[in-house]
Amino acid sequence: MYCWDDYKHETPQWFRDAKFGLFFHWGPYSVAEFGNEWYSRNIYDKGHEARAFHEKTFGSTNAFGYKDLIPEFTGEHFDPEQWAGLVQLAGAKYAGPVTEHGDNYSLWNSQINPVNSVKTGPCRDVVGECFDAFRTRGIRCLATFHHQWLWGWFMGNDMEADVYLPENELYYGKILPLETGRYIPNMLPDREFCQQWRDKVLEVLWKYSPDAVYFDSRANIIPDMYKQQICEALYQRADTAITYKQFDFPEGTAVVDIENGRFAECKPFPWQTDDRLEELPTWSYVKDPKYKSAERIIHQLIDIVAKNGNLLLNVGPKYDGTFHSSAVAVLKEIGDWLRLCGEAIYGTRPWCVAAEGPTVMRDNNYDIKKINNQIELGYMMESSMESFSAQDIRFTQKDGAVYAMALGWPSDGRLVVRSLGTGSGLKTVTSVRLLGCGCPVEWVQAADGLYVRLPETQLYAHACALKVE
C-alpha cells in the first residue's frame, strides 16, 4: 500500500497566479437541451420530468435510450480556435472541456473507451484540439473527470429500459443493483471498474499532458491506490495540480474545490470554487438559457481571490459546438473589467486583511447533503448568494502594493477604506491610483481610514480597484 505522505504536493505558482478559469460541459446530453447535464441519468427514472420530455421527444427508453443521442451529437460547428478566443475574451487563464462526465462518453481519442468523440458523434478529438488551441495562446490546460459517477449512473427504476440489456454494456457499463446509484453505495466499484477509471485518466495524462486535473465529487468510492497512481504520474511535473471535492484526497496532496461555494474567511491554503455562468440549475446548455450577470461573477471572483482562492467558471456550449450570444456577452463584460483591473487579481496573494464591509458571509459548499438531494431529485439544490455594496471591500497584494477593490461604485464618489487608516498600525500611504484610469484621485489617510474621492463620472461598472502604495 502506498503512503499518502509520498504525494504531498505544493500548488504550482501558475495556478495561484491564474485566479480565473473556464470549463465546458458538453456531450450527448447537450442534444436534448433539457433539464441539465444529468439528463443521461434522469431519463431512466420513472416519474422524472426529463423522462417525460424524452419519451415525448424521442420515444421510450427501451427503443431510444441515451446511447441513441450520440449520433445526434454532431458538433458540426465546433471550432477550438473560437473556444480559445472565448477563454481569452473572458480573461481566463486556464480552461478545458469536461473530459468525461458520468455518462461514459469520452471527449478524447481513447483507445480504452470506444464510446468517444473521435469514433462517434462529432468525430473530433475535442480534448486534443482544444488543448492545442489553448496552448498557442498561452492558456493552461485543464482536464476534468466525473466518471466515478458511472458506477450505477444509469441504473434507474425502469427495468425495461435499454440500460438493462446486456448487449448495451459497452455504452452503459455493467448491469448493477439500483442502490449503486447512491452517493456512497453499499456495493462499491469492483476492481475492473476502478482499473478502467484510473486508465482513462492516465491515458489523458500521457496523450495530452494537462496542466491540471479536476475530479468531481464521489472520487471517495475509488480506493486510494488508484488515485495515488494518478498522483504519481501527474506529479512527475512539478508545475501540475489536482483539484478534489469533499474529502476525496488527503489534505496537502491536492487543491480542495468547493462547488458553488465560498469561504467566509481567508484560508492559509490555495483553494478553488467551481461554479457556473448558467442561472438555471444546469451546467449544460438548455433551451431558453439564462445567465448570471457579469457583476455577480466579478464580485464572486474578487471575493474568492481575496481569500486565497480561484474561480473555475462553467459555460455550456450548444450541441453543435457554438455558444449562446448572451453567454458570450457576459463573458466579454467580465473580460473587459479584468482588462482594466486585472492587476488587482492576477498574480496576487492575500493581504493581512481579506475583507471589510457590512455584508456578512458564511462558509458555503455543495456538501454531501446537497449531493444526496441532487441524486434524489435529479437537479442541484440552489444556495443563496450574498448581494454586495460599494462599502464591501476586498484586498489583495502584489510587489509591495495593496489593492482595495470596492464591490460597487459609491453613488457620491467617496470611498472610505477603513483597513487602511493610520490607526490600524499600517505604514503611511504614499500613493493611491485608480486602476483603469489615467486621471489622479484625491485622497487622505486618517486614523479611521483612507478617504478617496473617485471621479464624478463612473468610469466602469461592477467594482472599482485602487492600487495603494
Image (cartoon, rainbow, N blue to C red):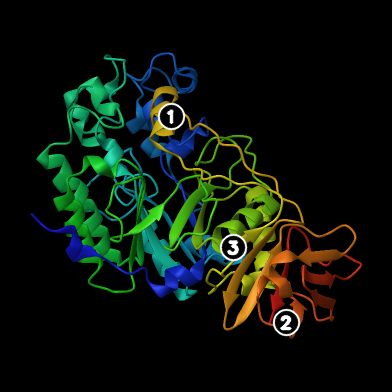
Q: Mark 3 belongs to which amino acid?
A: Ala
User: What x and y, as percent, mark residue 291?
Assistant: 64, 44
Total number of numbered discs in the rendering:
3
Label 3 SS = loop
| Picture quadrant of residue 455 | bottom right
User: What x and y, as percent, mark residue 299?
Assistant: 65, 55
Cα–Cα gap, marks 3 and 2: 18 Å
Identify the residue at image location x=61%, y=53%. Answer: 300
Label 1 SS = helix
State the residue in front, 92 or 406: 406
- Compared across the picture, whether 116 is left or right of 380 comes to left
Q: Mark 1 belongs to which amino acid?
A: Gln
Q: Is residue 336 visible?
A: no
User: What x and y, as percent, mark residue 82?
Assistant: 54, 62
| Picture quadrant of residue 229 | bottom left
Camera-side mark, 3 or 1? 3
Callouts 3 and 2 close, C-beta under 8 Å: no
Q: Is residue 10 visible?
A: yes
User: Would you name the residue on which mark 3 appears?
Assistant: 354
Cα–Cα gap, marks 2 and 1: 50 Å
User: Would you name the residue on which mark 1 appears?
Assistant: 374
Which image quarter is the N terminus in? bottom left
Cα–Cα gap, marks 3 and 1: 33 Å
User: Would you name the residue on which mark 2 appears?
Assistant: 429
- The earlier-in-sequence mark between 2 and 1 is 1
> Residue 425, which numbered label?
none
- Compared across the picture, whether 426 is left or right of 167 comes to right
User: What x and y, as percent, mark residue 56?
Assistant: 49, 17
Camera-side mark, 2 or 1? 2
Q: Mark 2 belongs to which amino acid?
A: Val
- The earlier-in-sequence mark between 3 and 1 is 3
The answer to whether residue 343 is above or below residue 23 is below
